[in-house]
Image (spheres, rainbow, N blue to C red):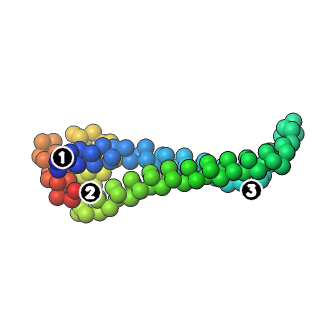
Amino acid sequence: MITQKDKAEQFKRDLRSRQFYEGMVREYDLKLEEISIHLQGVNSPRTDVVRKTSHHRQNNFVYWLMEEEICIKERKNYCDRIARMDETLAKLEDEERDLIVDLYVKNKRHENVADEHHMNRQNMYKKIDKMLFRIL
């Protein structure tokens, strides 16, 4: 059985991975842009490339459609993860949200975060756990 503590720890791991998720969304945006160019049929400016037959172009077109579908699904997966984090964090007051974002998303040193929020580290972690138990 998944405990409340397990959910809180998983949420912290997700928050730490947020920058990675955002980077993957940007990466898939670039891939989708490239695929869009291929689907529009923009040819390479290189003159040494041998023209392909129309049959090969059809297969190539299907390939790029399939690649586009895969990229859209993967991008949506990362966007959904980010959206779930945002929805969960929206349940907190601004000050509480800033504390969690500073510590887990922005990866600031815990000593600095505790000082900025005028508390000691032990109380900061207790407060964070209480907040996460409340919203998860």
Q: What number is the disc on residue 97?
A: 2
- Secondary element at tag 1: loop
Q: Position of residue 38 (x, y in %)?
A: 72, 50
Q: What number is the disc on residue 87?
A: none
For the C terminus, give its image quadrant.
bottom left
Select label 3 or label 1 by which is in front: 1
Q: Position of residue 27 (x, y in %)?
A: 54, 46
- Secondary element at tag 3: helix
Earlier sequence position, callout 3 versus callout 1: 1
Packing grade of label 2 (10 A; few <14, some 14-19, many >=20) is some
In the image, what residue occupies the spot 23% across and 49% down?
7
Q: Amino acid at mark 2?
A: Arg
Whole-angstrom CA distance, mark 2 to mark 1, is 28 Å
Whole-angstrom CA distance, mark 3 to mark 1, is 50 Å
In the image, what residue occupies the spot 21% across and 39% down?
111
Q: Are marks 3 and 1 in contact (CB under 8 Å)?
A: no
Select label 3 or label 2 by which is in front: 3
Disc 3: which residue:
40
Earlier sequence position, callout 2 versus callout 1: 1
Disc 1: which residue:
1
